Image: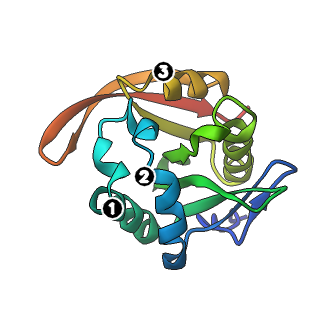
Amino acid sequence: MTKPYFNLQPDFLEDEIVKLIPLEESHFEELFKVASDPLIWEQHPAKDRSNREGFKTFFETGINSKGAFLILDKQTNEIIGTTRYYDYKPENSSIAIGYTFLARKFWGGPYNKSCKKLLIDYAFQYINSIIFHVAAENFRSQKAVLKLGAQKTNTMVVVNNGINLPHFEYELKKR
């Protein structure tokens, strides 16, 4: 029996809090308005994402990944950020979730957890392991990933624009 096909970008995932829809080129301007807040990137190694050129690179990588989503507030349809699947490894039955950011007014509430739960629940229909890569200095994201039940499994270096950036890898296994 073959496993069903894992579509990295289903038409939508939603619950009572958020709705995730495939990221499209037409979302650039509205999403950049959210991303242009430098405090969003304060603990992130790629701080240039708050300017147009830095965000354009981030956005285009998301579009090209074919696994990126626009995050909408389910009640108001307001754009609140983006997230994506990446690094799908069918041979390991794993996928990574990341490149997530939310507008600051949505920090500390149910939004990030809701978004991640949608992605996790969908992915676990097809794979057994979810990976999160978090910069060593991104304490907010580290806490958020631990709250999801992920365990730190590795320390690694990610090269970004020729700069070595320490990261932690976390894994959440299907139960």
Q: Residue drawn 75% across and 60% down?
A: 13
Nearer the N terminus, badge 1 or badge 3?
A: 1
Mark 2 or mark 3, which is nearer to you?
2
Amino acid type, label 3: Lys
Amino acid type, label 2: Ser
Q: Position of residue 14 (x, y in %)?
A: 80, 57
Quadrant housing the N terminus: bottom right
Q: Residue drawn 61% across and 62% down?
A: 70
Amino acid type, label 1: Arg
Q: Position of residue 145 (x, y in %)?
A: 57, 28
How many neighbours does mark 1 have within 10 angstroms: few (below 14), some (14-19), or many (20 or more)?
Answer: some
Element assignment for label 2: loop
Which quarter of the picture shows residue 71?
bottom right
Name the residue carrying label 1. 52
Name the residue carrying label 3. 152
Mark 1 or mark 3, which is nearer to you?
1
Confirm or deny contact between disc 2 and disc 1 (CB under 8 A): yes
Which quarter of the picture shows residue 59?
bottom left
Element assignment for label 1: helix
In space, the residues marked 1 and 3 are separated at their CA atoms by 33 Å
Element assignment for label 3: strand
Nearer the N terminus, badge 2 or badge 3?
A: 2
Using residue 117 as the reference point, say whether residue 141 is left or right of it: left
Residue 96 visible in the shown view:
no
Decide which of 108, 118 is in the foreground and name it.
108
Name the residue carrying label 2. 36
Q: Residue drawn 74% across and 42% down?
A: 114
Q: Position of residue 51 (x, y in %)?
A: 32, 55
Q: In the displayed structure, would residue 85 be above or below residue 171? A: below
How many neighbours does mark 2 have within 10 angstroms: few (below 14), some (14-19), or many (20 or more)?
Answer: some
